[in-house]
Image (cartoon, rainbow, N blue to C red):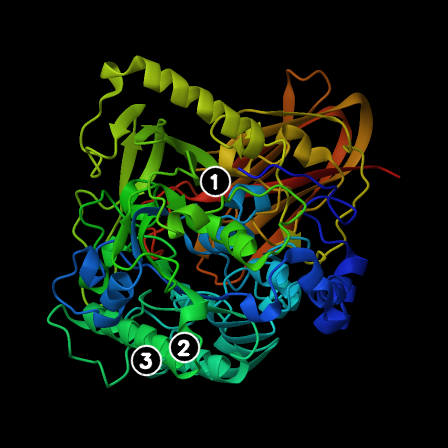
Amino acid sequence: MVVQSIERKGEERGILPVPAARALWQTPRMLSPRFLTGILAATLAQGTHGATATELPNFVVIFTDDQGYADVGCYGATEFETPNLDRLAREGMRFTDFHVSQAVCSASRASLLTGCYAERVGIQGALNAQSRIGLHPDEETIAEILAARGYRSGIFGKWHLGHHEPFLPLQHGFDEFAGLPYSNDMWPVGYDGRSQRGTEEQKSFYPELKYYEGNAPVDVIADLADQDTLTTRATRRAVEFLEQHHSRPFFLYVPHSMPHVPLGVSDRFRGKSPQGLYGDVMMEIDWSVGEILDALERCGVADDTLVVFTSDNGPWLNFGNHAGSASPLREGKGNMWEGGCRVPCIMRWPATIPAGSTCHQLAATMDLLPTFAALAGASLPAHTIDGVNLVPLLKGQVDVRPRESLAYYYNAELVAVRRGPWKLMFPHHYRSYAGVEPGRDGLPGPYSRGQSELSLFHLERDVGEKTDVLSDHPEVVAELQQLGEMFRTDLGDRRTKRTGKDTRGVGRLPPLRDPVVDHLAVGKSVRLSRPPSPRYQGLGAKTLSDGKLASEDFHDPGWLGFEGEDVDIVIDLGESVPLREVRASFLQDQRSWIFLPAGLQVAVSIDGDHYRTVHRSSQIAQHSPAQVTDEVSFPVSGIARFVRVRVIGVKQCPDWHPGKGGKAWVFVDEIQLFEQS
C-alpha cells in the first residue's frame, strides 16, 4: 500500500461546496490550476524525471463490462473464438490471479482510475440517472497524473462515475470523451426490447440513454438496433485517436459497454458463434482488440505501448445464455466470491514483457495507476492510494510479490481478506445465483440469498472455494482476522459499524432544497425502537434532529434506511412545550426498492409513559417512477415533552414490482417540531 496523505481540498470531505460546483460548471477544464500545473510539469519533465518525451511509453486499457473469467480462448472459452486476445497473450503476459476491488460497475471503475479501494474514494454500487454524486474533483485519475508528463488521454465507451458535468471525464483529466455516461441498461426500454416510456413498468422512470461527445449529449441510444452500434463506435473512435495522437505520449482508455445486457452486436458478427448472442458479442470485442493492435502497428508505436485487457467484474449469471462464464470460479457479479471479482487480464509490451508468459501473482486493477506512474516517471497522487507497482512482474520477475494482501469489500462491507493464497470469508449475506434457474434470451432469472459463515480457503489448491479449512489452520485465521481489523480501521466496515480513518467522500451536486432547517427538535435526544440498516445508518438516531435535510439521493448520509421493518422514533424536547405541528421527511425511489411509508402514527406525551395519539394515516403503495422526497405535516395541539412518530413500512415489494416478495425499504429524514406562536 502506498501511504501518503494530504489535507482534503474544499470545505468538507466528500461535499462539493456550492461555489466550487458553480466554478466547475463555468470554468473550462483547460484553464484549471491542476491542468496548468500539468503543462508546466511536462515542460520540465526531461530534467526532473530522466526519460525524454520520446522515450515515454504509451498506455492502452481495454475494459469490458460483465465479462467472465473464462470468456477468452486462453482462459478456457470453447464456444466462441478470440484470436486477437489469444495473440495478445502469446505476445505478452496472462494473469491468473487478477482482481477488481468490487464486483460492481462504478466502484470497480473508480478503483481502476484512482488506484484506490472504492471505500477510500466513496464510490459504491452502480450510479444511475438519478444520482447526484460522482467521483470527487479532488481525486487524481490516471489521466491526470499522466497529463503532468505531457500525455494526451482519451476515453471511448462507458464512464459510470457520475453523469453530471462536474463529474464527467473532461473534468477528470481526459482530453476526449465519446460514449455513455452509465450502463447501457439504464434506459426506458424493457428487457424484451420494447419501450416503457409512458407505461407503469419499472424502467419507465429512466430518461433517454444519451450518447456523449465531450460534456454534451449528441445522440440517443433509443432501441436494440442502437445498442448494436456501441462496440463499433468505441472502436472507431479509439482508432481515430491513435491515428491523430501517436506522435506524442498517450493514454487510451476503451471501457466497452459490452457484454453487459442488453447485448448488442453488429451484423458482421451476429450469428457467428455456436454459443449464441453472447459469443457473438465477445467475438466483436475480440475484433475491436485486433483493430486497436493493428492501428498501433500502422502508427509505428506497438513496441512503445503497454496494452492492458481486463474486465470490470464477473458475469451477470442470472441472465443465463446472455451471460458469460466464471468457470472454475464460484458465483459471479454482485458478490465477492472469486467468480465476482477475479477477472481475465492480459498485458503486452514488446521487448519488456516476456512473450507467452503467465503470472500467478496477486494483482488488481488499482495497481495500474502506480504502475503507469512508475513507467512514465509521473508523480503519485499526494493523498493515500492502495495500488502497488507491478513493473517487476511485467519484467518477468514472477517470484516477486508486489501485492501481499487484498481486502474484499462490497457496498462498504468488508466480506473477506486475502494474504498470499489464504482467503478468510467473514459472516455476511450476499446475492447468489445458486439454486435458482437463470433467465434466457435477454430476460433475467431470480437471485437467491446466500449466507457465508466465517470460513477459510486456500485458493492455490481450491480456486473454486469449495472446501472450508478453517478448523485446520487457526494460526492463519488469527493472522487474517488481524488483517481485517487493519482494513476496518483504515477503510471502515458497515457490518461492524466502523468508519475508516482515511477515507475521502464523493463529489456531490448542491442540494435541490435548502438543507438547513430550524425547529424545536434540533439537537434534542432521539431514541429509535430499532437501529437502521448498517448500510444506511447516517450518524445514528441524531441524524433525525441535526437540522439538516437530506437530498434526493439515498446514498446521502442524511437518510436512515430500514429494511422490511417498522420503526418508532421518540424525540425528547427536555421540557414540555405547546406544540402546533410535526413534519417528517421520507424518500421514494422504487427502482431501489425504497417506498413511502404504508402508515404513520403520531403520539405525544408529557411523562414519556402515557401517550396520546394525535394522527393516524395509511396508504397503499402505488407505482411511481419518480424519485422524490416527501415531507408530510401533521397539526398538533396541546402541551408535550415527548413526540413519538411510528413509521409503518411497506415491508415487502408489491406484486407489480420487479422485486416482488423481497424486503422493501423505508428511508426517514429530519423530524421537525414547531411550537405554537
Task: Tell me where residue 162 appears, x and y as whole percent.
Answer: 57, 61
| Above/below status of 579 relative to 295 | above
Task: Tell me where residue 131 appears, x and y as whole percent.
Answer: 56, 58
Q: Tell which circle, 2 or 1, labels the residue nearer the N-terminal end.
A: 2
Crowdedness near tag 3: few (<14), some (14–19) or many (≥20) residues, C-alpha within 10 Å: many
Which amino acid is tagged 3? Answer: Asp
Using the rendered view, name the quadrant where residue 608 is placed: top right
Q: Which numbered disc, 3 or 1, marks the residue closer to the eye? A: 3
Q: Quadrant of the C terminus?
A: top right
Q: CA distance from mark 3 to mark 1?
A: 42 Å
Q: Tell which circle, 3 or 2, labels the residue nearer the N-terminal end.
A: 3
Q: Under tag 3, what secondary structure?
A: loop
Q: Which mark is residue 228?
A: 3
Task: Tell me where residue 595 appears, x and y as whole percent.
Answer: 48, 49
Lateral position of residue 575 relative to residue 525, left or right: right
Q: CA distance from mark 3 to mark 2?
A: 25 Å
Q: Under tag 2, what secondary structure?
A: helix
Q: Nearer the viewer, residue 92 or 220?
A: 92
| Above/below status of 6 relative to 137 | above
Q: Which numbered disc, 2 or 1, marks the residue closer to the eye? A: 2
Q: Residue at x 52, y 56 (%)?
A: 375
Q: Which mark is residue 296?
A: 2
Crowdedness near tag 2: few (<14), some (14–19) or many (≥20) residues, C-alpha within 10 Å: many
Q: Nearer the viewer, residue 343 or 372?
A: 372
Q: Which numbered disc, 3 or 2, marks the residue closer to the eye? A: 2
Task: Tell me where residue 10 appears, x and y as whole percent.
Answer: 77, 49
Residue placed under numbered mark 1 in the picture: 649
Lateral position of residue 27 relative to residue 632, left or right: right
